Every structure is written in structure tokens, then in C-alpha cells.
Image (cartoon, rainbow, N blue to C red):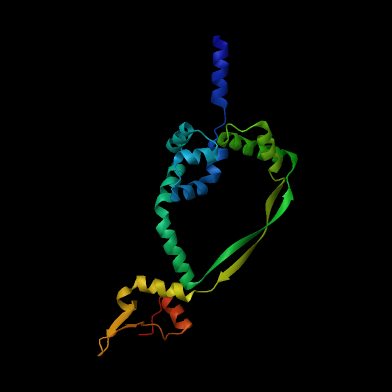
């Protein structure tokens, strides 16, 4: 190889666009989820379409990637607790309504290219017929946000009871009384409370005692 050819190859390598911006950064939320679900980094690389060497390099260069990996491992318990609390007191959420539109030729070509690159990475021994079959199965339409709707979920009494038991077990646990006959009888301190009273308790306004 001549010196000029070597310089040309080096220049091309330096000018090559990092796949972090296109393949990794837009999927940080998914990476966090995969980490939470116990997915290995090698498996993540296959899903993202990047090499393990590049992935390790990205972890050094981009703190948000490392943070997503760490957050995924620590977030499971917190999210379960948060979900239980929301079910206990009720909550509102925004639901996005999507419509489908046909991709233009440029969008379609880029979409197919990305999908085929990932397919080839996951299926290195695929035949040309299998590649064509997969390519033809890819959708020609895209989802586009049409509008957002605010929806409300009412408080759930069962979740409220469970939350109260764990939040203040000394006051809200099921108590047991021993009758003169020797029979052990469970006493539920909120079995006679109305649903509205339970809701107030879940919100922290305890005026029932």
C-alpha cells in the first residue's frame, strides 16, 4: 500500500460517522429496559447493530449510556412501588393516538437498510431467499402522532389496602384476637370502611381512627 493510499484510508476512517447517534442514542430507554430485564451487553449489541468494541468505547465517551445501564439495574423495585402507589390513589396519563401513513421512498430505503443490517447481523447464515422474504415482509407505512388524550384511572381499593399494610404495618396489618374458645380470629381494621374512606387513607388523610 502506498503512503497516499494509507492517508486516504485513514481520512475515510476519521470521517466515518459514529453509529452512536443513529443506533444507540435514540434507544437509551430500550437499553435501560434491557438492562433491567437482565439482558447482557453482548445481546444489546446485536439488537443495536453495533460491535462490542464500539459499545465499550461508547460507554467511555457518552455518560448517558453508562447511566442508562446503571439505572436499568436499580430501577425495577422503584417502578413497582411507584406503580402500586398510583393504582392505590388513582392517576391520569396521556395516551397518544397514532395514524398510519405511507413512507416516502427515501424513508422506506433508510428503514429497509437499517432493518437488513440488523437482520444480517443476527442471521449471518441466512440465504438470499430468506433475506428477500424478510425484506418484503417489512411494512411500507409508518405511525404518525395524530393527537394526545388525557385519561384517568380511578383508585383501586385492593392496591390501597396493600399500600397501607406495607406503609404503616403496626396500624393497618390484619390483627388476630384469641376468643375464649381458643379460636384465633383475624380482625381487619378497615373491613367496615367505605371505598371513599379507603381512598382518603391512601392519600394520607387518616381521619378514621
In the image, taking residue 62 as reference, residue 187 lies left or right, namely left
**Residue under the point 45% across and 33% down:** 57
In the image, taking residue 209 as reference, residue 108 lies left or right, namely right
* x then y, percent, for residue 76: 42, 56
Nearest the viewer among 61 and 123 is 123
Quarter of the rendering occupied by the N terminus: top right
**Residue under the point 57% across and 26% down:** 15
| Picture quadrant where residue 138 is located | top right
**Residue under the point 38% across and 74% down:** 164
Above or below: residue 112 compared with residue 99: above
Q: Is residue 203 visible?
A: no
* x then y, percent, for residue 7: 55, 15
Above or below: residue 178 compared with residue 12: below
Q: Work out which residue is located at the far bottom of the displayed protein and give it.
A: 180
Nearest the viewer among 107 and 159 is 159
| Picture quadrant where residue 49 is located | top right
Q: Can residue 199 be seen in this view?
A: yes
* x then y, percent, for residue 197: 44, 83
**Residue under the point 56% across and 39% down:** 23
* x then y, percent, for residue 47: 54, 41
Amino acid at each position: 500500500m502506498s503512503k497516499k493510499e494509507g492517508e486516504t484510508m485513514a481520512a475515510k476512517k476519521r470521517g466515518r460517522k459514529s453509529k452512536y447517534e443513529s443506533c444507540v442514542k435514540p434507544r437509551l430507554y430500550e437499553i435501560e429496559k434491557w438492562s433491567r430485564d437482565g439482558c447482557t451487553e453482548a445481546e444489546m449489541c446485536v439488537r443495536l447493530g453495533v460491535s462490542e468494541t464500539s459499545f465499550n468505547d461508547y460507554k467511555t465517551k457518552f455518560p448517558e449510556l453508562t447511566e442508562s445501564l446503571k439505572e436499568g439495574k436499580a430501577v425495577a423495585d422503584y417502578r413497582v412501588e411507584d406503580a402500586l402507589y398510583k393504582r392505590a390513589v388513582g392517576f391520569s396519563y396521556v395516551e397518544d393516538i397514532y395514524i398510519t401513513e405511507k413512507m416516502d421512498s427515501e424513508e422506506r430505503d433508510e428503514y429497509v437498510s437499517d432493518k437488513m443490517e440488523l437482520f444480517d447481523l443476527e442471521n449471518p447464515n441466512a440465504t438470499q431467499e430468506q433475506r428477500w422474504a424478510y425484506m418484503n415482509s417489512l411494512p411500507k407505512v409508518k405511525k404518525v402522532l395524530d393527537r394526545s388524550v388525557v385519561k384517568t384511572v380511578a383508585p383501586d381499593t385492593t392496591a390501597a389496602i396493600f399500600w397501607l399494610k406495607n406503609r404503616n404495618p403496626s396500624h393497618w396489618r390484619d390483627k388476630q384476637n384469641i376468643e375464649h374458645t381458643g379460636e384465633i380470629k383475624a380482625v381487619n381494621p378497615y373491613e367496615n370502611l367505605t371505598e371513599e374512606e379507603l381512598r382518603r387513607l391512601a392519600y394520607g388523610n387518616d381521619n378514621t381512627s
